[in-house]
Image: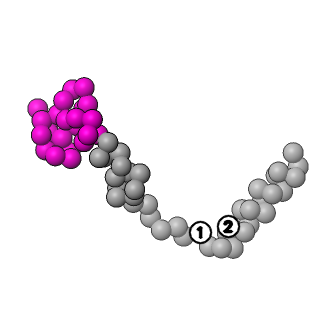
Amino acid sequence: MSQCPICSKPTNPEHKPFCSPRCREVDLNRWFTGSYSIPVPDSDISEEDIDTLERAINALDSNN
């Protein structure tokens, strides 16, 4: 049987992968508060590239 990622108790099929509603809510709170994050590489887009893209989007919007 797998273990709860929060408290390491056996998981409960009703709350899988957690053992209880409490651990499920602890995990959700960690996502909401930024304790967990998904790493993303730094952007190589320059301010000039962003300006060019914004102008292109605005041009498309004005044509519609």
Between 58 and 12, the residue placed more toward the observer is: 12
Magenta span includes 46? no
Q: Give the residue number, with chain letter if any, for mark 1.
A: 45
- Horizontal side of residue 62 vs 34, given as left or right: right
Q: Where is 57 relative to 47, above or below?
A: above
Mark count? 2
> What amino acid is at disc 1?
Ile
Q: What element carries label 1?
A: loop
Q: Is mark 2 on a helix, strand or loop?
A: helix
Give the overall secondary structure of the magenta segment: loop
Question: Residue 23 at what x, y percent from top left?
Answer: 24, 42
Rendering quarter of residue 5: top left
Q: In the picture, which quadrant includes the C terminus? A: top right
Q: Around disc 2, counting alpha carbons within 10 Å, would you say few (fewer than 14), some (14 to 19), or many (20 or more)? A: few
Alpha carbons under labels 1 and 2: distance apart:
7 Å
Query: Is residue 38 shown to the viewer in this render?
Result: no
The magenta stretch is: 1-24
> What amino acid is at disc 2?
Ile
Please tell me which residue is depicted at 78% across the width and 63% down the height of the picture. Answer: 55
Q: In the picture, which quadrant includes the N terminus? A: top left
Q: Give the residue number, with chain letter if any, for mark 2.
A: 50
